[in-house]
Image (cartoon, helix red, strand yellow):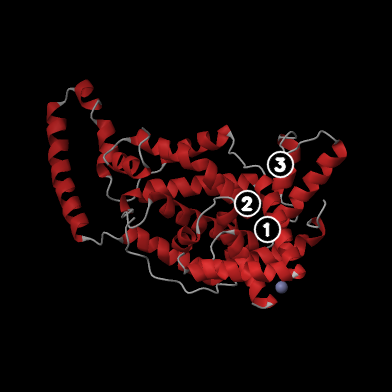
Amino acid sequence: MKPSDEELVDRFRSGDEDSFRILVERHSPRIFNIACRTVRDRNLAEDISQEVFLRVYRFLDGFKKECRFSTWLYRITINVCFNAQRKRKEEPKVLIPSWEVANVGSNPGTPQLEDESFSPQKTLEKKELTTKIKSAIDSLPGVLKMTFILREFEDLSYRELAKVLRCSEGTIKSRLCRAREALRQKLEIYLSEGL
Amino acid sequence: MNCRRAKKKLSPYMDQALGDKEKLELERHLEDCSSCGHILRQLERMHSLVQKIPMEKPRPAFYEGLYHRLSQKEKAPGEGLFRVRYLWPVFPMLRLRRLAATVAILLAVFGSSFYLWRSLSVPEITLRAFDEEYLQSRQMIPLTDELILPISDERE
Ligand SMILES: [Zn+2]
């Protein structure tokens, strides 16, 4: 049976460094995914994820188990993502997200929306649509974006979201409603029936 | 239920976060109102498109970089033993009993005063530090519309 996060935390605290690696391998894809959705820049997302685990490593002894490890990890992630976004706003030079550039250059085969057909025209349309959706999500204000990302990509319940983002479930409900409405209005032309 | 209220319920409806009564009221409204039904279908289509965006995976270099950075970084205060542990294999090679004894005494003195200091110092520093930083970052971000609740004490 796989050890729980909390068991791994205990083992790490008593000196077992390998437990930390297991925690990294278990959670890094998720953390990286959140970072990618938040900043839309693969390099920056990797930096963010590394920073998250460096902080976890540094502060794990102070983790008081007031909440689950994953909740604590999400909080750190949100924190580091917000800081990164703030810094990005302070340096408004980057116009094209290097995410899109990196995608074309280093990994041309990266699927966009899952393809059922091989029609180049359709693939291109789907790629464009993926980019449009990502960019619409990116345009959401910070907290709305993070709430939406954690709900849609991490499938966190309202209760978990309220804990991670430290607000009431009512606030989560209203933020998701606003985020989705904003996205719907932005993407309306792509959402008509029969497409 | 009017359209304005119904529109606010569509998002929690998709998340199955409505109570039985609200859900029933909304469904009744949707039966009669094509405009709200249209918005719901758009939201559902958007959800399915978002779900189709493939998950991003970190490159292998990410792990190499991370483990390299980790090997260079010390833990926060309180983990003195972590580094000392790696010195032990050195002693049999050196065969310097006097040095070992001196180091042991020094360690005992520094170690005990360190642990005394630590036991007297504030234990909750890290989570608090995060909270403060978190709140600071919050203040910089527009649309901090929600109440920031204190850290919950509950256990799961
Ligand atoms: Zn209506």
Q: Residues within 10 Å of mark 1 (few under 14, many from 20)?
A: many
* In this view, A104 is above or below B113: above
Question: Helix or strand or loop: what does disc 2 sit on?
Answer: helix
Between disc 1 and disc 3, the foreground one is 1
- Write down the chain letter for disc 2: A
Q: Is residue A158 left or right of residue A116?
A: left
| Residue toward you, A106 or B10 | B10
- Please state which amino acid type lies under the numbered disc 1: Ile
Q: Contact (CB < 8 A) between labels 3 and 2?
A: no
- Residue with the mark numbered 1: A137
* Percent of width and height locating residue A62: 32, 53
The residue at 81%/57% (across/down) is A192
Q: Contact (CB < 8 A) between labels 2 and 1?
A: yes
- Residue with the mark numbered 3: A102
Residue A37 numbered mark, or none = 2
* Percent of width and height locating residue B40: 70, 62
- Write down the chain letter for disc 3: A
- Please state which amino acid type lies under the numbered disc 3: Ala
- Write down the chain letter for disc 1: A
- Earlier in the chain: of badge 3 and badge 2, it is 2
Q: Quadrant of the N terminus of chain A?
A: top left
Evaluate whether label 2 is on the same chain as label 1: yes
Q: Which of the 4 image quarters holds residue B28?
A: bottom right
Residue at the limit of the structure toward the right, as seen here:
A121
